[in-house]
Image (spheres, grey):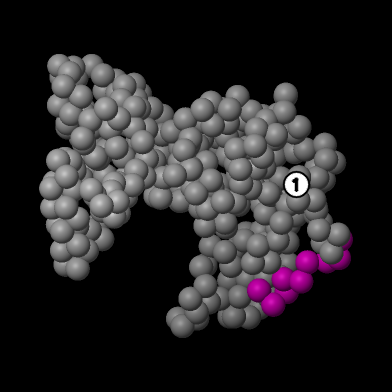
Amino acid sequence: MVHPDPALDAPVVTTAVAIRGCPRRAAFQPVTRGVHRRRLDGGDSRDPWLADLAGWQLLLTQHGCFTGLTAARIRGWGLPPVPEATPVFVAMQLDDPRPMRDGIRTSRHPDPIPHQVIGGLRCATAAETILACARWLSVLDLVVVVDSALQAEDVTVEELRRVCRPRRRGRTALLTALGRADGRAESTWETLLRLLHVAVGVEVTPQLEVLDEGGELVARVDLHLVGTTSDHEYDGGHHREPDEHRDDLRRERRLSSLGRVRRGYTASDVVRRPIGVLRDVDLALGRAHDPGRIRPWIAMLRESLYTPSGRAAFLRRVGTTSVTGGK
């Protein structure tokens, strides 16, 4: 576990990017009341959101840090579609003064949350970040975050289980998500496609390597339906690029020559027309098509950030007020 950096006991040097107060200079723009950061010019490739966080960090105590979805985004993990109105998530100690601002959500802890410095921003460790996400996200959304963090090798399942100590908020949700997570997914949509298959009652093997008779690698498929010759994959927009499309067709022909059936799906298939995926699954398994099998998946979707109802419920949960909930 990473402990707070002793160097952080010194004042954070962010004056070049953000300052407290209200400067009368056009070079600065407001982040929140009493905090400004330098404007980014047209040739600046930095993310404005990250620049804003340098300002929010000025409101934290020396051991306060970003956590939850904020820290997950700083780390570059794949995330569900987080609403723009989502607050900045921070962790502070119980006796720290709470930042009295709209747009920030504070969790309180009896001890400092272990953190790391990433790009000048103090972020809770990967395991603490995910536990904080578990307070607010649905199971489906949380599995997306966990899969991405595991794929990035930023955390291990063992580390995640260790932070799930009794009485810690988010513990039950995270343990549930760990039972459904699989770090082999290479994108958030691969995670969703896998969860859809599991929800309709099919065993799958992610990232299966398909070899020809000579042992040469033909393809590594997103999902293999165990007990069948069918492989289901997520096809993002880049698969329609001419060069990518050409390579995909060659790959599909090679799979077909081995007696395998490859089916590709888009984000719309997974979220808006999952019954079509179920129909293909039933066909591959040789079982009677039963539309009722899709109900568990629809229930998961409705609670998630992938639907308007799920996003509205999430925003009601997070609000912008402080919450006490430590270890």
Query: Where is residue 175, by image quadrant?
Result: top right
Name the secondary structure under disc 1: loop
Q: Nearer the viewer, residue 140 or 35?
A: 140
With 207 as the anchor, is 68 left or right in this view?
right
Query: Can residue 240 be seen from the camera position used here?
Result: no
Query: Can residue 169 be seen from the camera position used here?
Result: yes
Q: Position of residue 282 (x, y in %)?
A: 18, 24
Q: Is residue 15 magenta?
A: yes
Give the residue displayed 60% in from the left and 24% down from the top.
172
Vertical relation: 203 (above or below) 213 = above
Q: Position of residue 188 (x, y in %)?
A: 40, 46
Q: Which residue is mark 1?
A: 1
Give the residue displayed 73% in from the left and 67% down from the top.
20
Give the residue displayed 69% in from the left and 49% down from the top.
124
Q: Position of residue 132 (x, y in %)?
A: 63, 39
Give the magenta-colored segment's residue range: 9-17
**Quadrant the C terminus occupies:** top right
